[in-house]
Image: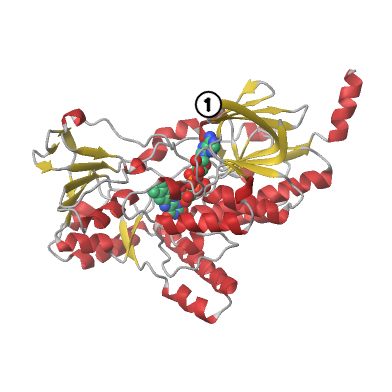
Amino acid sequence: MTHYDVIIVGAGLSGIGAAYHIQDRCPSKSYTILESREAMGGTWDLFRYPGIRSDSDMHTLGYSFKPWRAAKAIADGPSIRQYVIETADENAITEHIRFKHQVTAAAWSTAEARWTVTAQVAGKTVQYTCNLLYMNSGYYNYEEGFTPEFAGIESFKGTVIHPQFWPEDLDYSNKRVVVIGSGATAMTLVPSMADKAAKVTMLQRSPTYVVSRAAEDKIANTLRKLLPEKIAYAITRFKNVELGRIFYNRTRSKPEKVKAFMLNMVREELGPDYDVDKHFTPSYNPWDQRLCLVPDADLFTAIKSGKADVVTDTIDCFTESGIKLTSGETLEADIIVTATGLNLKLLGGATFSVDGEAVNFSETVSYKGMMYSDIPNLVQTFGYINASWTLRADINAEFVCRMLNKMDELDVRQCTPRLSEQDKNMETKPWIDDFSAGYMQRMMHLFPKQGVSGPWQNTQNYAKDKKMIRKAPLEDGSLIFDNAATQAVQQQQDAA
Ligand SMILES: Cc1cc2nc3c(=O)[nH]c(=O)nc-3n(C[C@H](O)[C@H](O)[C@H](O)COP(=O)(O)OP(=O)(O)OC[C@H]3O[C@@H](n4cnc5c(N)ncnc54)[C@H](O)[C@@H]3O)c2cc1C
């Protein structure tokens, strides 16, 4: 069995970033990346639907160490995939990736201070060992998306597609398309398909907040012309983080004002005759669920052109020729796209054990949103839902490197978050709190809990995390460094 200091699972945006940080800050550590697919890029390789793009700016969704060079800050999927590949190639990370390795299990042995990681490769089982297991496997199921049960779906004579599995050869020219959903995917698909399709209807059960923003960041593009690239990127990144933070905080402190501001923007776009109350006014406050960003108002332009429209209603059933709504209306369609969401998946669906005991993550408490109580040497990347994912992935990776270097400095092999007797009585709450989106709520019971104080929180707040993760001492009384190699040898000798 080949042994590595670190095994990274997943070669998406986070996994490639993790590898970069390890090479940079822990150059003596050996590592491999186990990736279940044939290509890197994760989300940005999997999703191929028309118009696939980010909905946060690439100056914060990009890595801290690699400037985003393209003019468009809201970037398309292929450009993001290329950015990930370029990062891996130019830093000699690609040769560390083992593709088509689906990790199915990981077993920790305290005596050996190592994980044994089991993967499936073309029907065969292979195993590797590592001291630290670093899960960058994303947060959703790659094999299936979420589709609610629709009565009569089998009777529909047209084509039904889930955006996660877009058929490369789908011709939707002059077709009537209904997109079910009101999330980022639906908002992207509708204007992108409107050009060629006869008509695209976005059918939503309830509205989402939609904000238009320029696809190009003029300040970023000007700074890039005037300043050295890295400095320009750092300034834009700082600007965007701060603007995002100020806006998010305002949605929490003055939700009514932010709501009025956003709805006015939509009214200005769509004109006085459009029913903004019905189609664009959610029942919840801004950022109680994810906001949808539309670049250069493309969704509104498509609606104004008459090639796209929004229907707010519920589905009674599918029919042979479309969808019957509970209001009694019908929507005729040739193609129905179920942009109904993702299925969350914890830690790439692998099973975990510690010294022979199966781990039930819902019984654990999250440590800083990246480790779990009583599980040694296991780190996970789970980014922000209210800011760019990579902001969090980057600081996680810095923390992992500090932890690896600390273990060397102390000459120990293990670091484990441990709840003190007092912590064990601490009040707990769900892993993601204060966010009511269905895809989160459906699976939250499987995730670890978080505490209400100290390092046991999963703050979902970049400013707080920077203090808690980047600056706080590693030996904080909760993260326990132990299991020295010399101790283990002594124990073995004593036992003998
Ligand atoms: C359509 C879409 C748009 C998005 N837009 C944004 C955005 O604009 N801004 C933002 O911040 N976030 C966005 N997100 C969230 C997005 O997923 C993250 O930004 C980011 O790409 C996640 O990167 P990741 O590497 O952590 O995970 P992923 O991209 O999901 O990559 C995980 C990798 O791990 C591999 N893997 C999983 N399980 C296993 C296993 N058991 N064994 C081996 N390999 C495994 C997968 O094959 C994959 O390659 C979006 C998500 C989607 C679906």
Q: Nearer the viewer, residue 29 or 302?
A: 29
- Residue placed farthest to the bottom in the image? 226
Tell me if I can see residue 279 in this picture. Answer: yes
Q: Circle 1 is placed at which residue position?
A: 123
Task: Identify the residue at horizontal 87%, vertical 31% (top origin).
Answer: 487
Q: On screen, 168 above or below 195?
A: above
Q: On screen, 376 above or below 259?
A: above
**Left or right, residue 24 beside residue 42:** right
Q: Nearer the viewer, residue 455 or 6?
A: 6
Label 1 CB-ligand 1 distance < 8 A: no
Q: Position of residue 157 (x, y in %)?
A: 15, 34
Residue type, mark 1 in image: Gly
Q: Quadrant of the N terminus?
A: top right
Q: Quadrant of the C terminus?
A: top right
Task: Identify the residue at horizontal 52%, vertical 66% (top origin).
Answer: 237
At mark 1, the secondary structure is: loop
Q: On screen, 187 above or below 372?
A: below
Q: Nearer the viewer, residue 436 or 372?
A: 372
